Image: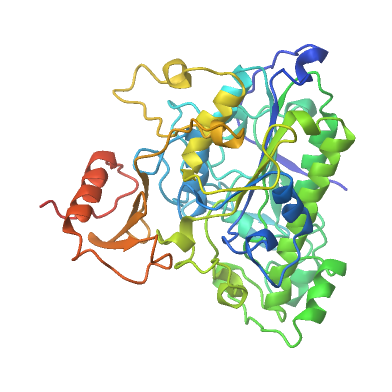
Amino acid sequence: MNYASVSFIGSALLLPTLSIHAQQRNAQPNILFILCDDMGYGDLGCYGQPFIRTPHLDAMASEGMRFTQAYAGSPVSAPSRASFMTGQHTGHCEVRGNKEYWTNAPTVMYGNNKEYAVVGQHPYDPDHVILPEIMKENGYTTGMFGKWAGGYEGSCSTPDKRGIDEYFGYICQFQAHLYYPNFLNRYSKALGDTGVVRIIMDENIKYPMYGADYQKRPQYSADMIHQKAMEWLDEQDGKQPFFGVLTYTLPHAELIQPEDSILNEYKEKFNPDKSYKGSEGSRYNAITHVHAQFAGMITRLDYYVGEVLKKLKEKGLDENTLVIFSSDNGPHEEGGADPTFFGRDGKLRGLKRQCYEGGIRIPFIARWPGRVPAGTVNDHICAFYDLMPTFCEIIGEKNYVKKYANKDKEVDYFDGISFAPTLLGKKKQKEHDFLYWEFNETNQIGVRMGDWKMVVKKGIPFLYNLATDIHEDNNVADQHPEIVEKMKAVIFAQHTPNPNFSVTLPEKK
């Protein structure tokens, strides 16, 4: 297969090689964070999904810890991933929405297909450390495969500039809506890349982006990304600890995949099925098997996770590797998806782009044989910005805030609390006083404080008691003005202005 490449300026640092003893049981563990795209809380069998097979993820839950009250960093992709990367909530993080950088860029042609010369989203703050940089400084080799969404091509924040040694996938989340794209992105020092390059899908670009011939495109990105991740895992020899981020784009729109046994299983199961007429402006093609396509995407993702876990066992890395699986936000409706049919929200209210539970509460499974207690279900309340301190504690990086805070900033925020004690079955776990989210595109703010949950929509607060009203049906703001004021005070204290992302704060009393 012949690929053409387009280079962008970047740089990379060499990592020290550790001794072969670095992978012994008491040495620094490997960490894999597997993040899927737009999977709802109720999309897996172990979370109650009745229609879709997920045997490998269900087994992962039985062999590890399944969280019931874990939250994404945001109700949409880019800021949620930014929260994970930065250890900040979206009142402090630079990236708070899906701000695009391609709409005014010049166009280029791949065959007869028009694309933008620059693609990607708002960059991470270059003056705030992100997780791969911390891991790299602590002797880890780092790989990321899938969606980046942390800066546009040529910006100050691309994988090559932010601590990633090997990258393959979509630098732009808009591009990641499509599974048979015109190009993907790569950074590989081993292959001589000096920055992020475009890898042209030469077999795909023979066919148009929209219409019946689109299905003739043979290069399926989900498989390609997974295979690159597996190749990277296969290169790990136990001499140096690794930190991998596998950001699979499944089960996000579009609803299309190879015609194989996975898809055909569900075509038989959901017959007759719902159809979708397509939307050329959004680049979503028409499909005739909505439910089969969606179910197949989740089972395919489950298969990928199974292959990852099998590879770790084959290489003898299983017992020294913490694997966490989660989703970046709640379920979507784009491209013909039908979350209501599958009960995808796990009986929670709301979808992607909303600060209700269905938009931000996500599946979250951790597995580490011999370290994470097997077969446990845990109701610890945590969010994506807790992963930075958790991983730092696990690798032995003490007082990470003092070490990595930028002294040139007036305040360099780190909002997370390590839940390593919970993961390791210990009792001394520090709890959050509150969790915080804001999202400019729907002008919403979310605050959770114990069982109280407040959603602020366009400045108007709505209060719910999750202990008795998990679906957030009954607004009790008028009955509990003191709670409303207490949670409003959290908003006033946590929100920092950002010229690129704004929300309407509630009125001060």
In the image, taking residue 181 as reference, residue 458 lies left or right, namely left
**Residue 67 visible here:** yes
In the image, taking residue 281 as reference, residue 113 lies left or right, namely right
Question: In which quadrant of the rendered view does residue 144 lie?
Answer: top right
Picture residue at 45% right of the left edge, 68% below the top: 349
Picture residue at 77% right of the left edge, 44% below the top: 4
Picture residue at 62% right of the left edge, 60% below the top: 177
In the image, taking residue 98 as reference, residue 444 lies left or right, namely left
Residue 234 screen position, x and y as percent: 85, 34
In the image, taking residue 491 as reference, residue 206 lies left or right, namely right
**Foreground of the two, 331 or 231:** 331
Residue 35 screen position, x and y as percent: 63, 47
Q: Is residue 330 above or below residue 308?
A: below
Q: Residue furthest front?
A: 427
Q: Is residue 192 above or below residue 492?
A: above
**Foreground of the two, 449 or 509:** 449
Q: Is residue 262 above or below residue 363?
A: below
Residue 272 screen position, x and y as percent: 74, 88
Question: In which quadrant of the rendered view does residue 432 lie?
Answer: top left
Residue 476 screen position, x and y as percent: 25, 66
Numbered circles on residues, count:
0
**Foreground of the two, 335 or 87:** 87
Picture residue at 62% right of the left edge, 70% below the top: 284
Q: Residue furthest left?
A: 509
Q: Is residue 324 above or below residue 453?
A: above
Question: In which quadrant of the rendered view does residue 232 lie?
Answer: top right
**Residue 224 visible here:** no
